[in-house]
Structure formats: structure tokens, C-alpha cells
């Protein structure tokens, strides 16, 4: 394993195939779940009610909100991206098992590809790093195994020779991997009858939400990206909000629109189309793209678009998120 420098890796410090020294393991207990709930206010019934979770899953114990599981894993993966500029895409995001309150998550990060970004005279040199992220529970069972591509700073514009093909996420949705990852044996009837939502219909969450508690979420998830903590490193003196925070608010809005949702099985795409800053007010709209029957319910794939309003200006797009969820 390779230990990062105290202030993180420059692009030139990475080597394809290296595994970075992992971040501390995190036990997601009732306190962590409560702090997340206070920040994002997600009404996902399965993560709010232990009796309901036990009735649906047939197993004892409360379940952790799937967004919090992802945010912890991504936060732990920032051992690689303390010199981050932005995260460009996620790939293969599927939650492979449900996490119970009190379980411990450990994440390892492996460098899978490197590519220099094109240089421009108006900005410092940058490079793209494809990271493989694997999260396991306390019994070493896989919870997540996905990739994210980060844009990080380079020391200089001197050529490094790194020109790997990092691929992309692909626009075409394949439901088969999500069907394989969907929980089996769950009884979704306690969540209520299937909700009618025609394919192609867009629904707007009427509850707009302010972005607050940003640094608390960064600390909770052990996210080490400095722009999320130090406002002087953001844009025009504004602290950049952790992208997962926007996803958390988007999921909360989607659950308000689909209150029978059991869980988020995974993400087809997640594109941060613009920066989000503290005290922005976000609004969320969701379009149902397709429905895929499974043995105990339905997988529903959505396109969720988030806009942010700041300083009295017109809202600007900040997130294009495409989750696949399990519901009756």
C-alpha cells in the first residue's frame, strides 16, 4: 500500500495498480445516522423505522440510508483526492448488500488509470485519475465496488506520458446489473401498494431545500477534499459543497415524490453539472425513465435534475443523477 503525502497526491505521484493506504474504518451507528438525517432530511421510511425495516427485510435491526453508505465510501476514498479539482463521473455504482446500523465500513482505493488533461494558459495543469473503490463490512462482505474519475492538480505542465483510455459511463441504461444487485426475499407489502407514475412523466418536488450543514457532512464522512472545508479554496471565496450532499438532498426529494421506495439499488449516472455552495436553495425534478419487474416488486430508473438558486439569481443546473430504485 502507498501512503499519501500529508497534503495529498499530485497527479504525477500516482501509479496505475497501486493501492493507497486506507482511511479509517467507520462504524455507522445511531449517531451517524441521526446527523445525516438532520442534514439531508431524507424521509426514506426504511431507514427511519426499525420495525418497518425488520418487516420488509425479514431480519432484525435498523438499516442505514443507502445515500449515507455511498457518501461514507466516497469520503473514505478521498485519501486519493486531496488535490481534487472535480469529480467527473461514477461508474458501476450498485449497493451489493444492505448495511445495518452498527456495522463498520472499510474502503480501499486502487488506481486503475491515468490520463493527462489538456493544458490551457488560463488554468493550472491537471490530470484525470480513474479510481477503483471497494467497500466491505466488518465481515469482509462486499457492500460497494465501483469506479470514480477525479480531476486532480499536476505539479507542472511537463509531459508524464499518461494517456490511458479511461472509458465513460455510457448513456444507454442496462437494467440487468441492477436486477442482479436488487435485494431478494424482501416483502415490500408493508410499504403500501404500487404508486402510479407513468413512464416519461416528470414530477417536481414542491419543497425547495437550503443547503446547510455542509461542513458537518464533510466531517461525518471523513471527506478530505480541502475545497469542501476552506472557503478560500472555493470559487470567489465560497466554500464548495461536497457533491454527495447534493445527491443526498436529491434522494430526499425523490423519496417525497415516491414515498413507497424501499431502497436505492444503484446509480446509472451521476454528473455534477455545476458547483453548489452553502446556503444555495435547491429544487428537484424527477422523470421516470423505465420500469423493470423483479420477483418482489419493481425497479424504477429515474433521471433526477437539480437546480440551485443563489444570491437572488436564476436557478442553475447542478446535478444530473440517474438512480435505480426498488419499490412495490
Image (cartoon, rainbow, N blue to C red):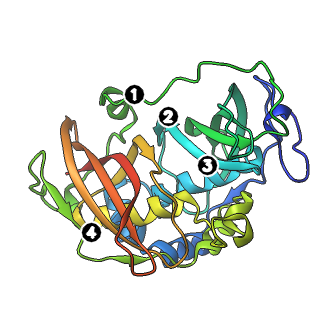
What label does residue 170 carry, if any?
1
CA gap, disc 2 and disc 1: 9 Å
Q: Give the numbered dot on residue 6.
A: none
**Most foreground residue, 201 or 122:** 122
Nearer the camera: disc 3 or disc 4: 3
Q: Residue 132 or 158: which is nearer the viewer?
A: 158
- Foreground: disc 2 or disc 1: 1
* Disc 1 to disc 3, C-alpha distance: 19 Å
Q: Position of residue 258 (x, y in %)?
A: 23, 61
Q: Circle 2: is it few (<14), some (14-19), or many (20+) Cα within 10 Å?
A: many
- For marks 4 and 2, give the CA distance: 26 Å
Residue at 35 percent across and 47 percent down: it is 323
**Rendered position, 163 above or below 173:** above
Left or right: 226 as drawn, with respect to 171: right
Q: Are marks 3 and 2 in contact (CB under 8 Å)?
A: no
Image location (x, y in percent) of residue 118: 65, 31
Identify the element where label 3 is drawn: strand
Pointer 4 residue: 256
Foreground mark, 1 or 4, reads 1
Q: Which residue is mark 2?
A: 91
Residue behind mark 3:
86
Residue 123 appears at what percent x and percent y? 69, 46
SS label for mark 2:
strand
Q: Which of the two discs, 3 and 2, labels the residue nearer the N terminus?
A: 3
Q: CA distance from mark 3 to mark 2?
A: 15 Å
- Of the two numbered discs 2 and 1 on the same chain, state the one appearing first in sequence: 2
CA–CA distance in space, label 3 to label 4: 29 Å
Q: Residues within 10 Å of mark 1 (few under 14, many from 20)?
A: few
As helix, strand or loop, the secondary structure at mark 4 comes to: helix
Q: Is residue 175 above or below residue 247?
A: above
Q: Which mark is nearer the camera, 1 or 3?
A: 3
Amino acid at each position: 500500500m502507498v501512503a499519501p503525502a500529508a497534503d495529498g497526491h499530485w497527479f504525477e505521484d500516482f501509479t496505475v495498480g497501486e493501492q493507497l493506504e486506507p482511511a479509517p474504518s467507520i462504524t455507522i451507528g445511531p449517531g451517524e445516522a441521526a446527523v445525516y438525517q438532520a442534514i439531508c432530511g431524507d424521509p426514506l421510511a426504511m431507514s427511519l423505522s426499525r420495525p418497518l425495516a425488520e418487516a420488509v427485510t425479514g431480519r432484525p435491526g435498523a438499516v442505514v440510508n443507502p445515500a449515507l453508505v455511498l457518501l461514507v465510501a466516497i469520503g473514505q476514498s478521498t485519501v486519493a483526492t486531496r488535490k481534487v479539482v472535480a469529480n467527473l463521473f461514477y461508474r458501476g455504482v450498485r449497493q451489493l448488500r444492505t448495511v445495518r446500523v452498527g456495522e463498520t465500513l472499510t474502503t480501499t482505493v486502487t488506481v486503475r488509470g491515468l490520463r493527462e488533461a489538456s493544458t490551457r494558459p488560463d488554468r493550472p495543469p491537471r490530470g484525470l485519475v480513474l479510481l477503483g473503490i471497494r467497500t466491505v463490512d466488518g465481515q469482509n462482505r462486499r457492500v460497494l465496488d465501483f469506479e470514480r474519475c477525479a480531476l486532480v492538480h499536476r505539479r507542472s505542465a511537463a509531459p508524464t506520458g499518461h494517456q490511458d483510455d479511461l472509458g465513460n459511463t455510457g448513456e444507454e441504461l442496462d437494467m440487468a446489473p441492477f436486477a442482479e444487485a436488487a435485494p431478494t426475499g424482501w416483502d415490500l407489502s408493508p410499504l403500501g401498494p404500487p404508486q402510479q407514475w407513468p413512464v416519461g412523466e416528470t414530477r417536481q418536488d414542491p419543497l425547495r431545500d437550503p443547503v446547510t450543514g455542509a461542513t458537518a457532512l464533510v466531517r461525518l464522512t471523513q471527506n478530505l477534499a480541502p475545497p469542501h472545508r476552506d472557503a478560500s479554496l472555493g470559487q470567489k471565496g465560497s466554500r464548495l459543497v461536497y457533491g454527495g450532499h447534493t445527491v443526498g438532498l436529491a434522494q430526499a426529494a425523490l423519496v417525497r415524490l415516491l414515498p413507497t421506495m424501499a431502497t436505492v439499488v444503484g446509480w446509472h449516472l451521476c454528473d455534477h453539472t455545476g458547483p453548489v455552495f452553502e446556503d444555495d436553495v435547491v429544487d428537484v425534478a424527477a422523470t421516470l425513465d423505465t420500469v423493470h419487474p423483479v420477483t418482489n416488486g419493481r425497479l424504477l430508473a429515474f433521471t433526477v435534475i437539480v437546480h440551485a438558486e443563489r444570491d437572488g439569481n436564476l436557478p442553475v443546473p447542478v446535478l444530473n443523477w440517474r438512480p435505480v430504485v426498488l419499490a412495490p
